[in-house]
Image: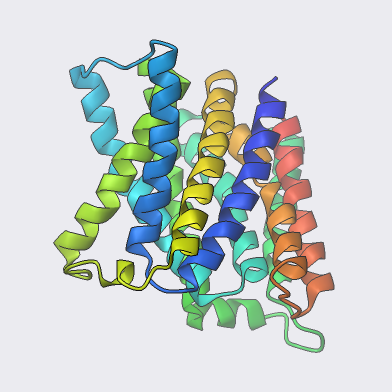
Amino acid sequence: MWISLALLSAAASAATTMSLKTVVARGGIVVPIAGYRGVAGLVLAAIVVALGLLPEPTAAYLRLTGLMVVPEVAGVLCMAAALRRGELSRVQPLFGTLPVFVMLSGMIVLGEMPTAVAALGVVLVAMGLYVTGLRRGASWAEPLRELARTPASWYALAASVAWTFATMVHKAGIAEVGPLPWAMTICLASSVGVLVASWVAATVRRFPDADGIAAGTWRRIALTGAVFAVQQIGLQLALRDAPAAYVTALTATSTVLATLLGIVALRERSAPGRRLAAAAMVAAGAVLIALGR
């Protein structure tokens, strides 16, 4: 069952990423992110209230919420910056590093050693990410040089690192209050956290990126939030039933869907064959990690 839920989360994640790409490309980052996360939180809150699952504000719950907000907000802001600065089909495969980081964290923090099949999956993920940066006739060292100078790549990797820490907290949050209440908490707390972080950093004084947002863009933000709610439902329910490393690995199959959407829907035509091949390798590695459970 957790595999079906993880695949549902992967499909919704790809749709969320593509939709968010079109939103942040038109203007600001803060309001769209806070908006779609807030919409998702309200959708999930309605479900939680209807099911009578509202969490009690215990000390443990509040502590876990505080621990989750910082890496979750950092991750989503870095993701939006990466999407704004780079093409979707180039940036999305770099988010495939998340299963690798989560598995390494599990080995260090939890003492969880990968099986041979999972280790092969890690190798495939690494190969896929490397191939993403290759051009025909270019040096094999070019991806390393590009990673050193391309801001979109920096932000994508930073998002994966931040979400690695967030994922560790998610497991504890689910154990404390359940998957749906925790998903609601993630969305609402991160929405507020994005606004607070922007205010503290003084990067946005009166949210000027909201001034020029058209009605159609607001509708896209709302749609993105609704899809993200589905992504969170699948993800948190899967995390309840399976180890975090394997769930995040399987949800990395969204790289194939998002890369295909970037090439077909957004007409990102720069080396589409190579990018699809690289994304497929990342996804295949992620599946092997999941099967290595």
Q: Is residue 290 visible?
A: yes
Question: Is residue 36 shown above or below 63?
Answer: below
Q: Position of residue 237 (x, y in %)?
A: 55, 23
User: Would residue 276 be found to the left or right of residue 11 on screen?
Assistant: right
For the point 75% across and 45% down, the residue is: 120
For the point 65% across and 33% down, the residue is: 6
User: Would residue 72 be found to the left or right of residue 153 on screen?
Assistant: left
Q: Position of residue 52 (x, y in %)?
A: 38, 10
Question: Is residue 15 shown above or below 204?
Answer: above
| Chosen colour scheme | rainbow
Of residues 153 and 81, the one nearer the viewer is 81
Q: Position of residue 29 (x, y in %)?
A: 38, 65
Of residues 102 and 116, the one nearer the viewer is 102
Q: Quadrant of residue 27?
A: bottom left
* Residue sitting farthest toward the bottom: 137
User: Would residue 131 be found to the left or right of residue 29 on screen?
Assistant: right
Q: Is residue 109 visible?
A: no
Question: Is residue 233 shown above or below 210?
Answer: above
Q: How many marks?
A: 0
Q: Position of residue 241 (x, y in %)?
A: 58, 19
Quadrant where the image shows the N terminus:
top right
Of residues 226 and 130, the one nearer the viewer is 226
Of residues 24 and 110, the one nearer the viewer is 24
Q: Quadrant of residue 80?
A: bottom left
* Residue sitting farthest toward the front: 215
For the point 56% across and 75% down, the residue is: 86
* Residue sitting farthest toward the top: 52
User: Would residue 274 be found to the left or right of residue 23 on screen?
Assistant: right
Question: Is residue 255 shown above or below 288?
Answer: below
Quadrant where the image shows the C terminus:
top right
For the point 45% across and 22% down, the residue is: 47
